[in-house]
Image (cartoon, grey):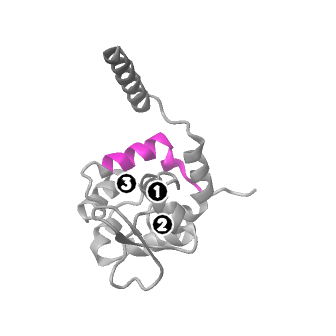
Amino acid sequence: MRRSALLIFLTGCATYLFAQQVCPPTDSVYWDYIARYKEIVLQQENEYGIPAAITMAQALLESSAGQSELAINANNHFGIKCTSEWKWETYNHDDDARNECFRKYYAAEDSFIDHSLFLKRKRYAPLFELDIHDYQHWAQTLRQCGYATDPKYPDKLMDIIGRYRLDELKAEVNE
């Protein structure tokens, strides 16, 4: 009896995982997040030269579309940790190590602005030699510059960009 219950459970899990890979997500949480933060990522693209598609993909991935603990409790949508120059509020959270220090923001939009400033550091200078629409190289170079340790980080960003058509993010034109 236990074996058949386990088999049913595993079959259900496999079916669910397969469906997640084949069927594009229609989760309204992700689409609502994109709609909510679209203007701020477009503003960051215009002001700092960081592709809106990359910023949005990173925010979706790092914050689980605003549902992560850091996003909810610290308005930190990019998982940016404290650095020696960070003099504002902090939030402790287990990540690579226990009780690590993360930046805490007054509002989510502040996190997006700080993300842009963070990428303007010397360490990430190679990004700004790339074409602003070359998302694949932006994703790879982010990883190469040490933004993420996950070797699949570029692929995850590209999957999100494709799945949610983030390469189509454009400012609304009022006529």
> Regarding mark 2 in the picture, which secondary structure is present there?
loop
- Amino acid on which the number 2 mark rests in the picture: Asn
- As displayed, is residue 39 above or below residue 115? above
Q: Which residue is mark 1?
A: 63
Please report the bounds of the magenta region as a residue range: 154-170
Classify the position of the C terminus by image quarter: bottom right
Tell me the SS state at disc 3.
loop
Drawn side of residue 111 relative to residue 131, left or right: right
* Number of numbered discs on residues: 3
Pick the front one: 169 or 97? 97
Residue at figure coordinates x 53%, y 48% from the top left: 168
Q: Is residue 34 magenta?
A: no
Which of disc 1 and disc 3 is earlier in sequence? 1
74 above or below 170? Answer: below
Q: Which residue is mark 2?
A: 76
In this figure, which residue is indicated by the disc labeled 3? 134
Q: Quadrant of residue 145?
A: bottom left
Which residue is found at the position 47% from the left and 53% from the top? 60
C-alpha distance separating marks 2 and 1 = 8 Å
Q: Amino acid at mark 1?
A: Ser
Residue 15 image position (x, y, % from top left): 40, 23
What secondary structure characterizes most of the magenta part? helix
Circles 2 and 1: CB atoms closer than 8 Å: yes
